[in-house]
Amino acid sequence: MIFIALIKFRKKAKDVAEFGKKLMQNLPEGVKMLDSYWTLGRYDAVWVYEAPNEKVAVQLGIDAGELMKTETLVGISRDEALKLLK
């Protein structure tokens, strides 16, 4: 499953960067980080990652919760979405 996490920092960016580096080295089992961006606007960062199920995605949000607030979306490919229209 693909997940997209919209992230708002709760602490200074330097603290979040240090935490994020450690988190990326110790991701929950089955999580593969596909992309990570710092952004301008409403959110400070976006993660795009693969996880085996929603429970594992929730665990990643809990692990990150001290330093960042996350809103996580489930993503499906455009091709898969188009198949649903048939």
Image (spheres, rainbow, N blue to C red):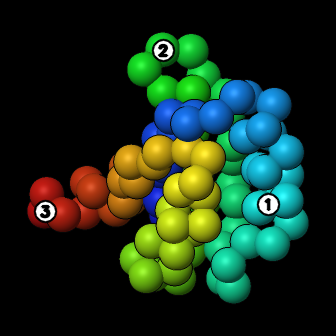
Q: Position of residue 16 (x, y in %)?
A: 73, 40
Query: Which label sits on residue 24?
Result: 1
| In the image, farthest residue toward the left | 86
Real-space Cα separation, disc 2 to disc 3, in angstroms? 36 Å
Tell me, for residue 82, which label it has, or none: none
Q: Earlier in the sequence, mark 2 or mark 3?
A: 2
Placement of 13 over or under 86, stated as above or below: above
Q: Tell me which amino acid carries mark 2.
A: Gly
Q: Is residue 78 left or right of 10 when viewed as pictured?
A: left
Classify mark 3: helix, strand or loop: loop
| Residue bearing the label numbered 2 | 41
Pinpoint residue 71: horizontal percent, then vertical percent: 39, 48
Q: Residues within 10 Å of mark 3 (few under 14, many from 20)?
A: few
Say if 62 sits above or below 35 in the image.
below
Q: Quadrant of residue 49?
A: bottom right
Residue for badge 3? 86
* Quadrant that contains the C terminus: bottom left
Q: Residue at x 78, y 38 (%)?
A: 15
Name the side, left or right, on which 21 lies relative to 12. Answer: right
Numbered disc 1: secondary structure: helix
The image position of residue 48, as x and y in percent, is 58, 51
Q: Is residue 26 shown to the viewer in this render? A: yes
Q: Secondary structure at mark 2?
A: loop
Task: Single out the residue that lies furthest toward the top.
Answer: 41
CB within 8 Å, label 2 to label 3: no
